[in-house]
Image (cartoon, rainbow, N blue to C red):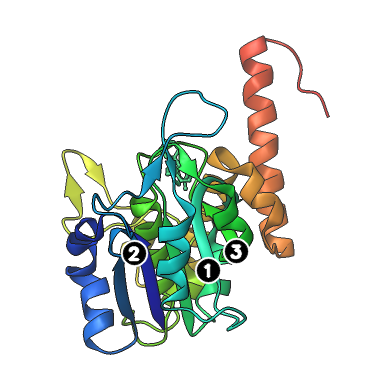
Amino acid sequence: MHIDVFTLHPAMFAGPLTESILKRAQEMGALSISLHDIRDHTEDKHNTADDTPYGGGGGMVMKVEPVVRAVEAVIASSSGVPVILMSPQGRVFNQRLASELSQESRLALICGHYEGFDERIRQTVVTDELSIGDYVLTGGELAAMVIIDAVARLLPGVLGDPDAPIKDSHATGLLEHPHYTRPPAFRGMTVPDVLLSGHQANVERWRRQESLRRSWQRRPDVLLKAALSDADRWFLMELAQADIAERAQKDDRPPQG
Ligand code: 4H6
């Protein structure tokens, strides 16, 4: 996959792209990234990339010409390459979108600064607008790095275990079960016996149930979309009944239902 990034701050990408798995992904040729400085496409002597908003009010707006020129210098219009604007107003990015984007051979990410973009940037070069969550950042760079990271780890060969992304929390629709490694006891906290038992079927059942328990407690919204077996449903019924019984005990009244 090739990713073109358009930014006023290309140096921000150095750290994340030159360490660990993203570094390896590039070395092995699964991923290549080109950073394009939007300021290189300004035409005035001060290299102005922003201007005051028409209609007044505070703040600055990213100018249309430098961004459109930068993108058009690299991506032919109607090439079919997704040109994605990182913005708090975009569709909220998730694992499903990461998986869809990982199927593309090429992506372009535009990072904004100032209060926002001249609307005509959206009308000319942008094909999609993504947000990494409902909060505001000083610029789109960190959001673009999140997208790159989430997509890169899904590319063939990037992770050691080719099934790892399929087993991921959020890919299965469930949160992950607890993990343990040595030592068997730490400050009185012991590893669950089943994990030391060597009984693989029991281990798998325990992990599945703990995933269900965590999803039920922390992310019932995620649980609603998950593919569940009959055994899963029975276990969740037991959890729900335990909850109802516990609440009834607290309220000191007989359990309902
Ligand atoms: C576009 C429009 C992405 C981009 C406005 C970008 C959050 C996300 C930005 C802005 C981003 C996200 C500029 C508005 C700074 C606030 C850059 N923030 N902002 N959630 N900021 O993915 O002021």
Question: Which residue is at the far top?
Answer: 252
Q: Which residue is pictured at 67% across the width and 48% down the height?
A: 236
Contact (CB < 8 A) between labels 3 and 1?
no
Amino acid on which the number 3 mark rests in the picture: Thr
Contact (CB < 8 A) between labels 2 and 3?
no
Q: Which residue is mark 2?
A: 41
Quarter containing the C terminus: top right
Left or right: 24, with 161 as reference point: left
Q: Which residue is pictured at 67% across the width and 44% down the height?
A: 238
The crowding category of the residue bearing disc 3, from other C-alpha atoms within 10 Å (few below 14, some 14 to 19, many at least 20), is: few
Disc 1 from disc 2: Cα separation: 17 Å
Earlier along the polypeptide chain: callout 1 or callout 2?
A: 2
Question: In the figure, residue 243 lies in which quadrant?
Answer: top right
User: Can you say whether 125 is above or below 50 in the image?
Assistant: below
- For residue 83, the mark is 1
Q: Position of residue 89 (x, y in %)?
A: 58, 44
Q: Secondary structure at mark 3?
A: helix
Amino acid on which the number 1 mark rests in the picture: Val
Earlier along the polypeptide chain: callout 3 or callout 1?
A: 1
Nearer to us of marks 3 and 1 is 3
Q: Which residue is mark 3?
A: 124
Question: Which residue is at the far right?
Answer: 257
The crowding category of the residue bearing disc 1, from other C-alpha atoms within 10 Å (few below 14, some 14 to 19, many at least 20), is: many
Q: Is residue 229 visible?
A: yes
Amino acid on which the number 2 mark rests in the picture: His
The crowding category of the residue bearing disc 2, from other C-alpha atoms within 10 Å (few below 14, some 14 to 19, many at least 20), is: some
Q: Position of residue 77 (x, y in %)?
A: 57, 78
Q: Nearer the viewer, residue 17 or 67?
A: 67
State ligand 1's quadrant: top left
Earlier along the polypeptide chain: callout 2 or callout 3?
A: 2
Q: Secondary structure at mark 2?
A: helix
Disc 2 from disc 3: Cα separation: 16 Å
